Image (cartoon, grey):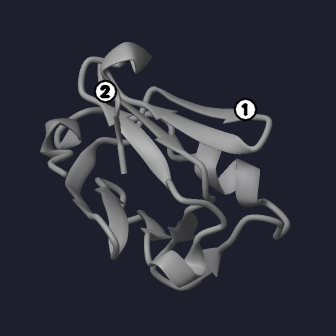
Amino acid sequence: MDISAIIGEELKAVEFVEDFLQLRFDAPLLTLHAWPHVLFTDFSIAFGEPEYRNALCAQIGEKVVQASLEEGDALTIELENGTVLGLSLREEDLDGPESGSYSETGDVSDAQEF
């Protein structure tokens, strides 16, 4: 799936909704049913670890410099400050049949599941 429309976009919001996460950019919307790792240059933070939510929210305002979604493999979003949001999409790493959805317009009615 092509998510390249988020390249150059600013992360506008990080929304925690019950058991999933939404990443809002200028227009596009990524909904994730699994929790991405926040990868800094020296260390990484995973869901459930102290400061996870703060680490994600600290990325608000950063622009995307690279983004890829390889179904069955990984979602990777690199931000201007060098932080990477990474999520394994391998079947053995996921809890359910779908790992998320992507809408280029930000409207959930045209979202494509992955």
Q: Are marks 2 and 1 in contact (CB under 8 Å)?
A: no
Along the line of sight, the residue nearer the viewer: 44 or 82: 44
**Is residue 94 visible in this depiction of the protein?**
yes
Residue 11, quarter of picture: top left
Name the foreground residue: 59 vs 46.
46
Element under label 2? loop
Residue on which the image places disc 1: 17
Give coordinates of residue 80: x percent, y percent.
29, 53
Q: Earlier in the sequence, mark 2 or mark 1?
A: 1
Q: Residues within 10 Å of mark 2 (few under 14, many from 20)?
A: many
Question: Where does the image place residue 88, in percent across and percent down from the top left?
Answer: 46, 74
Q: Residue at x 50, y 73 (%)?
A: 39
Label of residue 5 in the image: none
Label 1 Cα neighbours within 10 Å, binned few <14 / some 14-19 / many ≥20: few
Q: Which residue is mark 2?
A: 28
Amino acid type, callout 1: Val
Judged from this view, the residue extending furthest toward the front is 97
Residue shown at the point (47%, 67%) measured from the top left:
87
CA gap, disc 2 and disc 1: 17 Å
Q: Quarter of the image holding residue 34?
A: bottom right
Give me the residue at 34% from left, 28% from top.
111
Is residue 23 found left or right of 103 in the rendered image? right
Q: Give percent across and percent down for residue 3.
A: 20, 45
Q: Is residue 105 left or right of residue 44?
A: left
Q: How many marks?
A: 2
Locate residue 45, reporting x and y percent.
Answer: 66, 72
Amino acid at the residue labelled 2: Pro
Residue 107, visible in the rendered structure: no
Q: Is residue 40 left or right of residue 2?
A: right
